[in-house]
Amino acid sequence: MKIVVITLVVLLAGIDGFIHYLLTKKPKHIDQRTYEVYDKKTYQKWDAYNKEKSKLSVINKGILFLILITMLILNLHFEIYHWLEGFSYDTYTQNAYFFLIVTIIPLPIVITFDYIRIFKIEEKYGFNTQTKKLFIKDKLIETITWLVLETGIVIGLYSIYEETEGLFVLFGLIVAFLFMTLTLIIFPIMSKLYNKFSPLEEGSLKASIHDLLKSTNSKVSKVLVMNASKRSKKMNAYFTGIGKRRRIVLYDTTIEGLEESEIVAVLAHELGHAKHKDIVKMLPLSFLSIGLIIILLGVFAGFKPLSTAFGFSDSNFVFSFIILFELFEIMMILIKVPQNKWIRSMEYKADQYAVTVHDKASFTSALIKLSKINLTDLNPHPLIVTLLYDHPTLFQRIDHIGENHG
């Protein structure tokens, strides 16, 4: 069993390495429209930026891979768990400490590489605007929040496993569904820990947006502006929430970087997601992913050879969860391919909505500017699009608009 797990971990690392190879591989055929979006200097800038990001990610994941393999080969998970037995006789407390320590071990590496990415690469290519003080603040909030949340979830699942006598999957799925629904409420609250959200200022843009909302009879509770410029110059917008809590968020960089008509076009695209109820449609897929984790965790947790192969005397729920989390990416590839294809179809429909209720020229122009400013890969490998992209490429979107909207 130990050989099987380690082999799967190595296989995952190989798949990830192959994906990074494809990310930096020069395409055989470059769409000639690329040179209308990127001039020669900007294209070279994109190429260098893409390669530096990928190289850094490979090194980061390589180090994390070596840490994980070392821990698995030397049974260090068991050694940590055994060491903690002297600190608490309560298994819940012991397992909470166990999960915390194993989660904390790679954190210095992750944070260090985040620092390098932001202050070396993003800054080098003109994207970074955040200070080191803000970086430290963000990491403290992020680390504490997610450590508490993840540990609470794992120990909560462990409690259900111990107390429900074989009904773990049923109760786990119920709790997972409730938590997944709760995240729709939690997300806007957690976003406020990092960013400031303000109502759109009075003026021509707000009047144009109000006219669009009125003409489309759109039920959106708020249109907010997020101070994204405190961290990056990249531009974006997104739609979130369900029911009366539906809101559209525009980055302040988007407002600064686009013309008024282009901003309205971007917002019209987000309204398309609201009109089509895309967040609600995504809930079953999200539940499928979480449900699969719960079902597999029920199998893994009760499979004694998995834990005993790494030094434990009996099956260990938290260790089973850690191993499942490491290997789940293999199964997620099978889920993400159809999932991403479906999401890309949602993006196409939102694009069509935008050009129908606003205008084609403004939306197309906005897409091109967003791609250029954000240094988007305009010619990704088709396999990368299939595996990773939840948005169509720029030219796929432009072609689809042209085919369906003259």
Image (cartoon, rainbow, N blue to C red):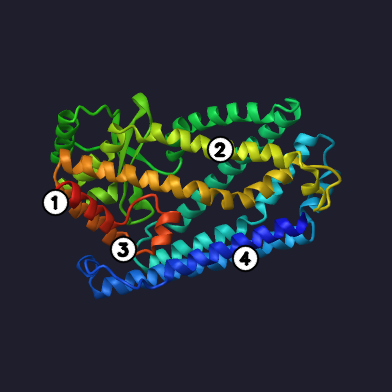
The residue mark sitting in front, 2 or 4, is 2
Q: Quadrant of residue 218?
A: top left
Q: In this orientation, does residue 156 appear?
A: yes
Real-space Cα distance between discs 2 and 1?
40 Å
Quarter that holds the N terminus: bottom right
Q: Quadrant of residue 304?
A: top right
Q: In this orientation, does residue 257 appear?
A: no
Q: Is residue 10 above or below residue 26?
A: above
What's the mark number on residue 361? 1
Picture coordinates of residue 228, whole percent (x, y): 35, 49
Q: Toward the viewer: 244 or 289?
A: 289
Q: Secondary structure at mark 1?
A: helix
- Residue at image mark 4: 63
Real-space Cα distance between discs 3 and 4?
30 Å
Q: Secondary structure at mark 3?
A: loop
- Residue at image mark 3: 378
> Label 3 is placed on what type of residue?
Leu
